[in-house]
Image (tube, rainbow, N blue to C red):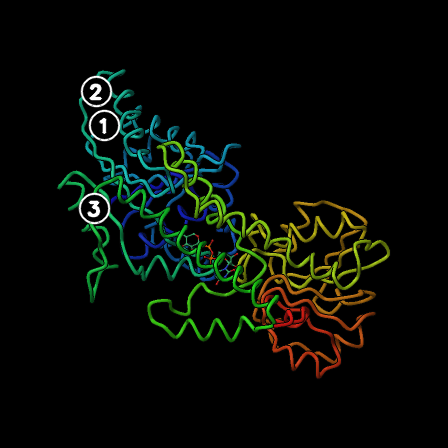
Amino acid sequence: MRVTIFGTGYVGLVTGTCLAEVGNDVVCVDIDAEKIARLERGEIPIYEPGLEPLVRANRASGHLRFTTDAAEAVAHAQLIFIAVGTPPDEDGSADLSHVLAVARTVGRTLNRYAVVVNKSTVPVGTADSVRATITAELVARGSEVTFDVVSNPEFLKEGDAVQDCLRPDRIIIGADSARAVEMLKALYAPFNRNHERIVLMDVRSAELTKYAANAMLATKISFMNEIANIAEQVGADVELVRRGIGSDPRIGYHFIYPGAGYGGSCFPKDVKALEYTARQHGHEPRLLAAVEAVNAAQKRKLFALVERHFGADLSGRTIALWGLAFKPNTDDMREAPSRTLLEQLWQAGAKVRAYDPEAGAETARLYGERDDLVLCGQYAALEGADALVIVTEWKAFRSPDFERIRSQLKQPVVFDGRNIFEPKAVEEAGLAYYGIGRGRSVKAPAA
Ligand code: UDX
């Protein structure tokens, strides 16, 4: 089928590439000429395992093209995907200006029936706004072209995005037109083998499904961080508790890892946007507000542990950080817990030496040249440092040379913000250990 994707960000680029991979003719369009020029040269603007060879192969076969020419891209398409950003406004609501700008472009240029597919994460009711915006443009130029608007939210995880796209666990289609449903079913047929993955529903339910999924996952994480903080106080080990509850299939092992708080481009933004929507419609979202508050506190947890060990004044101290990206296998620093920690450490007068396998350049871009930040190699980060803090659980950090860590650090202490080490192994290597909710640094209250 002939597909056009508006937006060559994370979702647009991965979706476009995967749709090209199964034989569709895909045009990706973006207003950012620089980005399109880079993609034309075969450069991928994001770090995503497996994406680059797939883009290269599909450009070579002619199934995938990039352009800034929106009118040509609209003329090409039977299906027009909107995959542009919905950044949070100051009040937490999702900013729809990019989505509605695409709708206006479509309305100005559409010359035959097409299905407009909304992939951006958008508040309930946005499909109606997109439909109204396109209609207004068509009416203004006296066009009688028809179209449908469908909600087809995205569930890609950064770092696994290509696999998630090629092997989705579900395909949500929110539509009120049989014609549009048939076209989407045909488009997704190659991804819908072996068992039925398509869940058909109305547009508003599809829009809410995306927020409900992310809010549920964020809730699991905040819940577990709360349990970790209780475990710390009562002298229990949350890692044992995690395994104990995860074995119940109703709970499951996924997304119950306590840590330094959730970050990234989705959870923080989507929880806030859902809260906003709820309030806008007269419902006070008490649970969502708590999920967010617990997470904000958890992002400050690592600093609290450092402070507990060294005291509030860290001037003259150097802290080594392993991991900066909001999670492994990405260079994304959006809402990363490392940023909260960096800023708190600097505030307290500490210097930081930091290593991340991918996010070094992005960190340098965010913070620029400064005396209190050195970006360097994994073990170089330990030179002259008082302590080591693990902020992101990259695989390369899991079995480090503890002897080397101990001999390089001025003070033998490790703060493990992702519970990737066994406290006993670290302690046997002669290092003090602080984890998240491991019941070690706080004594159980007297019975
Ligand atoms: C998420 C959703 O998983 C995806 O379906 C949606 O489309 C976009 O948002 P992503 O932001 O890429 O994807 O990352 P994810 O792997 O879900 O992790 C989010 C954050 O939660 C990370 O900061 C991670 O470290 C944290 N996390 C995750 C935990 O702290 N504990 C866990 O158990 C799981």
Residue 84 drawn above or below residue 294: above
Q: Quadrant of residue 80?
A: top left
Earlier in the chain: of badge 1 and badge 2, it is 1
Q: Is residue 212 left or right of residue 411?
A: left
Question: Total of numbered circles in the picture?
Answer: 3
Task: Please tell me the numbered disc located at residue 111.
Answer: 1
Whole-percent x, y for residue 134 in the image: 28, 26
**How would you rate the neighbour count of disc 3 (Cα within 10 Å): few for under 14, some for 14-19, many for 20 or more?**
some
> Which residue is label 2 attached to?
143
Task: Please tell me the numbered disc located at residue 148.
Answer: none
Find out whether the residues at labels 2 and 3 contact each other: C-beta distance under 8 Å: no
Find out whether the residues at labels 1 and 3 contact each other: C-beta distance under 8 Å: no
Residue drawn at (65%, 65%) of the image: 390
Name the residue type under label 3: Met
Find out whether the residues at labels 1 and 2 contact each other: C-beta distance under 8 Å: yes
Whole-percent x, y for residue 300 in the image: 64, 53
Earlier in the chain: of badge 2 and badge 3, it is 2
Q: CA distance from mark 1 to mark 3?
A: 28 Å
